[in-house]
């Protein structure tokens, strides 16, 4: 289990690095487009399309690592007020629903990418094929699903054995305290 968690955390970190590259690309492209438009009266063609696609990729790539760092908005204030015996079943239910939803989302987004590839759909102005972008987003959602599966297994271990695998899980790759401080 420890190796699987390390693999999931490693993939999530790599996807997060790609997200940063995408967002940096958006920034550079927008600034370059503004400079080209104002200095040379010649905008970069297709900027709107490329910025939209890079932003979508950046968001998708960041999801899994954000889940590892607990960076998503959560409604913990309600669950934290419940008795410990009720918190674990709620965690299992939330993790199961999240894993199921994002797993299905990854599957359907991948199927949609196949349809886009078959039909040859491209972006409006730059004529960039959309299917590779959508496949990458599906892969990112699959990464998020793996993180949620690991959380589900951790919650089930808490319920069955009364033991949290948290020390084996994300702390293998990340210090939970330092990661949470980095998010704040």
Image (cartoon, rainbow, N blue to C red):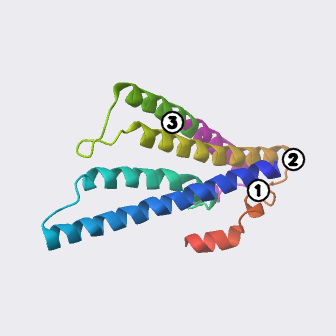
- Of marks 2 and 3, which one's residue comes earlier in the chain? 3
Which circle marks residue 161 in the picture? 2
Considering only vertical position in the picture, is 106 above or below 114? Answer: below
> Residue 21: where, in percent of width, then height?
47, 62
At x 44% / y 51%, what residue is drawn? Answer: 57
At x 39% / y 62%, what residue is drawn? Answer: 25
Which circle, 1 or 2, is nearer the viewer? Answer: 1
Considering only vertical position in the picture, is 26 above or below 87? Answer: below
Decide if residue 121 is in sight here. yes
Q: Are marks 2 and 3 in contact (CB under 8 Å)?
A: no
Which residues fall within the magenta stretch?
79-101
User: How far is mark 2 from mark 3, CA to CA?
Assistant: 31 Å
At x 45% / y 28%, what residue is drawn? Answer: 114
Disc 3 crowd, CA 10 A, few/some/many (<14, 14-19, 20+) = some
Residue 35 or residue 85, whichever sits in front: 35
Say which residue label 3 marks.
Answer: 105
Residue at the left extreme of this rendering? 41
Secondary structure at badge 1 equals: loop
- Of marks 1 and 2, which one's residue comes earlier in the chain? 2
Say which residue label 1 marks.
Answer: 169
User: How far is mark 1 from mark 3, CA to CA?
Assistant: 25 Å
> Residue 102: where, in percent of width, then height?
55, 40
């Amino acid at each position: 289990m420890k190796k699987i968690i390390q693999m999931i955390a490693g993939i999530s970190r790599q996807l997060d690095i790609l997200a940063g590259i995408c967002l940096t690309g958006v920034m550079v492209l927008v600034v370059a487009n503004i400079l080209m438009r104002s200095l040379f009266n010649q905008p970069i063609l297709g900027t709107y399309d490329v910025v939209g696609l890079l932003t979508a990729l950046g968001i998708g790539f960041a999801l899994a690592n954000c889940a590892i760092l607990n960076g998503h908005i959560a409604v913990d204030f309600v669950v934290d007020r419940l008795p410990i015996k009720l918190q674990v079943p709620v965690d299992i239910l939330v993790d199961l629903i999240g894993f199921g939803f994002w797993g299905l989302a990854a599957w359907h987004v991948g199927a949609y990418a196949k349809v886009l590839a078959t039909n040859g759909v491209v972006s409006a102005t730059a004529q960039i094929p959309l299917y590779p972008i959508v496949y990458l987003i599906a892969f990112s959602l699959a990464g998020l699903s793996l993180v949620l599966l690991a959380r589900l297994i951790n919650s089930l271990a808490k319920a069955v054995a009364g033991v949290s695998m948290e020390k084996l899980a994300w702390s293998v790759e990340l210090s939970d305290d330092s990661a949470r401080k980095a998010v704040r």
